[in-house]
Image: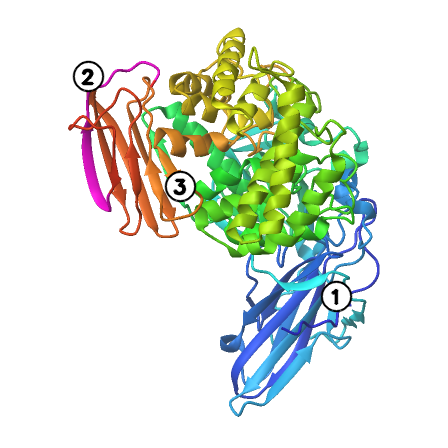
Amino acid sequence: MIYPNSYIAAGYEYADLERFVSAPFFRKKFTAHKTAKAEILIGAAGFYRIFINGEDITKGKLAPYISNPDDIVYYDCYDVSNYINEGENVVAVLLGNGFQNNPGGNVWGFDKASWRGAPKFAMRLSLVAEDGSEVNIESDDSFKVCDSPILFDDFRCGEYYDARLELPNFHSVGFDDSDFKNAIKVSSPRGEKRLCTADPVRVYAQLKPVSITRQEGGWLYDFGENNSGVCRISVDAKAGQKITLRFGEWLKDGKLCLGNICFWQQSDMQKEFVQKSEYICKKGQQTHTPSFIYNGFRYVFVEGITEEQATDELLTYLKMSSLKENAGDFSCSDEVVNKIQEATARSDISNFNYFPTDCPQREKNGWTADASLSAEQMLMNYYPEKCYKEWMRNIYKALNDRGQLPGVVPTSGFGYQWGNGPAWDNVIINLPYYTYIYRGDKEILEELSTPLMRYLNYLFSRLGQNGLMEIGLGDWCPPGVDEGAYKTPLVVTDTILTYDIANKAAFVYDVLGQEPQKQFALALAQKVKTAFIKHLFDKESGAVKGNTQTGQAMAIFYGMLTEEETTKALAQLLKYIDEADGHFDTGVLGGKVIYRVLAEYGNVDLAYDMIVRPDYPSYGNWIKRGATTLWEGFYPEGGRVTSLNHHFWGDVSAWFYTYLAGMRINPTGRDVTNIDIKPLFPKKLDSVSAYHDTPNGRISVYWERVGAGKIVLKIKAAEILHGRIVLPSGFSFADGSAERALESGNTEFVLCGVTETNN
């Protein structure tokens, strides 16, 4: 594909927090004869909306993508054959700052990015006549440009809009643009030009407020649940009335508080811009939806409206995401579990605009560990694979000359000196690996091959003389501990995850038939495993250095130990849990695996209780305290409040599918049509219902207790799916067996002979 490279802009000035520059309108009149086909190819450094003869044809919000334009600049292609009229036509573009100019990203250096400048775009409109002749209209300085009513836009801050400045029908035929100035030609972005293949960002649902409360200075709108998106405003007003909207997720003493989403590094002036939008009204009834922003919020504090205007019609919450269709669902007889599942799904979807972000309100950054930790729950619940593949290309571009990755992608340079290390970098293997496991997509592994080898070489170069790894970030956010403080030694988590990266890399290279690369990865894996056993594991007691739940669970889960060593390590893990009064005490790295280890080794009741118990710390405690999304950290009531919409604790959702419903997708890693069903039956749970849509059809599992010692198990499998049904210890089919083949279609079993002791 030949991409248009004729970039134009309204000027060279760009906005900051002290000097606003309006988002520009561009328009171009052209004459068309009868056409057989018409196509537009448009790329932008910034966000755009595009119109043909008054029709908004933009694929979704925040088009074309969110990327470092020094690495990749994205294009979209539109078939506009049905929009072209014979005679006069108009193509128009509204251009927002996007990542090209992000003054609200000062904490991460985006305000000093090498690419920072005024937003710009390139476009080609190709008109193909019925006789095959073609006319191309390229973006150039013949495009007319003027200021739009968007006075300021920053996708981390907000949008300031003056409806009095609207130009009705500016994008339509017949509009007089004689007073507009001409666009200027500017240089092309430096990045590789690519057609965006990620799923677009779209509005997938709408919410009305559940309550509206008058407070000093304004009105508090509560939408009942935490999400991300924008508010559409609809109001009957006088010209010049200014309405201010402040978006947040936390109330302190009943009032909106933004303290949990502001950074201490920000000045008071910078904090003033956090999730704030302004709308200046024109006369009469009007409706407006922001173009180039999104916020994370449950509450909106509205200033500048009258009591008559403070109705539920004033604001409509438009929820936005690139994740739009469910790949699965889980529910059960325990409403606490159901609310945890809902909170996880809500956190996943509200943190996914083209790629997974850490939080939708404070940072909107592509933190690599968050995505890596959440890969399985995302794939079980949604269809992130197109977005994963596109984001991975940005991750590969972010590898520096050493083969080192930053902690956030895209980045302007932040995250190489702080914020990375194996626990964050393992996104490079985990997203492609799990996408292959769950979807059977070999292409994502083929694209991984070369950058992965660069990264493995980097890992080898960072090993200590003792063969251990100790760089970067560790077991983030243990309960009650401030960010950056760990209970588990960094050398433990880093060394284990270096082994896991290398081990999975060997699997990838085996799938690809690349034997030398496989042997290189195996050598790295063996080196760190040997060093771990020698320096970090006490063979006599089974204790991992640091004596923490995380160290024990990770050593078991990632296969660092022999069977005998695992038995001792598990005993130590159970001891540490008992010493914590049955609570978990891990950061996010341990939280990913501890419940899996307990369930896998006969302690599903303990794992279940740790998850749902109502006292701090637990997921159940979050739900008891009103959480509708997953929080960043576990703190006691009245303690510290950080982000209330993070997804990196969400593997618990994948645990529900994998252990309670028993769905083991592609257990050998070699056949995506192979699914084993191995359900577990916690004593406090009466029923489970779940489904997952594999690339080859749906698998559904339902089980229910029907009396003393009896469980009905129902399974429905698409025709091509195959595998085993394996029951836990103490349960059997009617014929006394505990295993049988998975059959296609509907099957139903009554399980009997139950002995309910640590199943």
Say which amino acid is labelled 2. Answer: Ala
Task: Please provide percent x and percent y for residue 214.
Answer: 57, 29
Residue carrying label 1: 146
The residue range painted magenta reads 743-758
Quarter residue 55 falls in:
bottom right
Say which amino acid is labelled 1. Answer: Cys
On the question of residue 376 being in view, the answer is yes
Q: Nearer the viewer, residue 391 or 523?
A: 523
Q: CA distance from mark 3 to mark 2?
A: 31 Å
Say which amino acid is labelled 3. Answer: Ile
Verify whether residue 414 appears in magenta: no
Check the image and report above or below for 618 versus 282.
above
Task: Please provide percent x and percent y for residue 682.
Answer: 34, 20
Q: Nearer the viewer, residue 379 or 202?
A: 379
- Specify the label residue 708 is tagged with: 2
Residue carrying label 3: 665
